[in-house]
Image (spheres, rainbow, N blue to C red):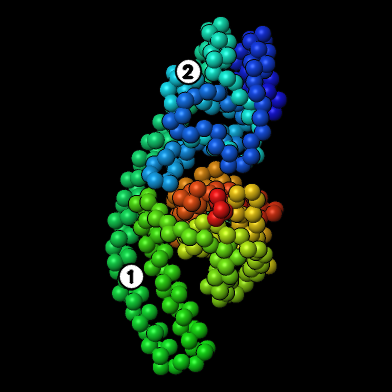
Amino acid sequence: MDLKYHQFISFFEAEQAEQLCQIAITENFPNQKILFEEGEKPDFLYLILVGKVVFKKHIAHNQYQTLAQALPNAYFGELGILDGQPRSAQAIVCEGSTLAKLERQSLMEILLNAKGSTVLKVFGYTTQRLRDSTDQYVKQLIYKEKMVLVGEMLNTVIHDFKSPLSGINLSSSMVKELHPDLETVEWCELIQAQAQRMSAMAEELLEFSRGNTVLRKKPVNLAKVLERFEKLNHIYLQEAQVELVIKAVDVVVNADENKLLRVVQNLVSNAVEAFNHPGGRVEITVGANGRWGRIKITDNGPGIPEEIQEQFFEPFVTHGKRGGTGLGTAIAKSIIDAHGGDISFESSCQKGTVFCIILPLVSS
Ligand SMILES: Nc1ncnc2c1ncn2[C@@H]1O[C@H](COP(=O)(O)OP(=O)(O)OP(=O)(O)O)[C@@H](O)[C@H]1O
Ligand SMILES: [Mg+2]
C-alpha cells in the first residue's frame, strides 16, 4: 500500500501527514528479520505497508510465545514511543515485508503539535490494541487450565499404555529370535519402531500439555528424515491409496529428528484424512534459502475449511472429523517454534494445501 493512505498517516491533518511522509524511512525486510528484541530501547514506530509482522514473548530458554500478528495498514511500537519504556516483545518479520519507520524524536514533535482529534484517534487505536491483548491473555489463561486437565488425563493414559507397549516390544523380539529370516526380522523391526513411536508420541503430547517442548538437537539431514518417514508410513499410505512423492536434497538443519518426524507425520496424516476422492497425492520437497532449511508439504485435497483458517494452529481447533482432537497442528507449531523456525500454510478448495516449514541451518 501507498504510505500516504496508511491509517496512521490518515489520522493527521494534511500538513502533518506530509511531514510524516517526509521523515518516514521505507525499507524492505526479508522473512524472519528481527526488527526489535524484547527489552530494547524504543527508537521507531513502524507502519506496515506490505507483508506481516509477528510479536513473540520470551517465556523460557529458547522458547517464545507468539502474542499477535500485524498486517498491512497496521502499525506498532507506539507504546514504547509514547512512554519511553523498553520494548515488551520481540517483533519479527514473517514474510518479505515493506515497512515505513518513523523516528521517535521527530514523531513526538509532530504529535505534540497535532490536533486533539488526531491524538484521540491514536489513543483509540492503542486502547483497542490493549483490549485485544487483554482478551488474548484471558484466552491463554483458560487454555492453560484446559491443558492442565489434558496433562492429568494423559498421565493416566501413558501409564496404562506402558505395559501393553512393552509387551508388543518383547513379543516381537521373541518372534525375531525364533524366526531369524530376513523378512520376519524386517517386519518385527517395523512393529518395534511403531511401538516406540507410540510411546514417543504419548510423551510428546504430555510435554505439549505442560508447555515445555524438550529438544534433543543435533545436525539432521532432512532428506534422511523423509526417508525414515516414508519407511514408517509405507503401509499406511498404501492402504489409504495416497501417492507420496518426496523430492529432497541434502539439507542439514539443527533439530530434534524425532520431533521433526512428528511434525511431518501430523501434517501428512491430516492431508490423508482430508482426501475425499481417489487420486490423493502428497508431495514433500526440501530446499534451503540463506540461513534456512525449508520443507514444503503439498496436497491436492479439498483445502482447509475457511472457517478454521484464522485460528488454525490453536489447540482444539478441529473440523469435520470424528475423533479429531485438534491438537495435531498445534503440536507441530509448538515444535517448530521451539526450534526457532516458522510454519505457515496456503490453502484453497481448488488447489489443496501447502505447508511451508523453515528451520535454522546447522551453520547458523
Ligand atoms: N491438509 C489438510 N487439508 C484439509 N484440511 C486440513 C488439512 N490439515 C488440517 N486440516 C483441517 O484442520 C483441522 C485441524 O487439524 P489438526 O491436525 O490440528 O487437528 P485434527 O486432525 O482435527 O485432530 P488431531 O490431529 O488432534 O487428531 C482438521 O480437523 C481438518 O479439518
Ligand atoms: Mg490432525
At label 1, counting other C-alpha atoms closer than 10 Å, the crowd grade (few under 14, some 14-19, many 20 or more) is: some
x and y percentages locating residue 42 in the rendered image: 49, 24
Quickly name the residue at label 2.
82
x and y percentages locating residue 344 in the rendered image: 58, 48
x and y percentages locating residue 226 in the rendered image: 58, 66
Amino acid identity at mark 2: Leu
The residue sitting at 42% across, 33% down in the picture is: 135
Is 80 displayed left or right of 144 in the figure?
Answer: right
User: Is the residue indicated by label 1 positioned so its CB lies within 8 Å of ligand 1?
Assistant: no
- In the picture, the disc for residue 339 is none
x and y percentages locating residue 11 in the rendered image: 60, 15
At label 2, counting other C-alpha atoms closer than 10 Å, the crowd grade (few under 14, some 14-19, many 20 or more) is: some
Is 157 displayed left or right of 105 in the figure?
Answer: left
The residue sitting at 43% across, 35% down in the picture is: 136
Is 125 displayed left or right of 95 in the figure?
Answer: left
Say which element carries label 2: helix
Q: Is residue 132 above or below residue 14?
A: below
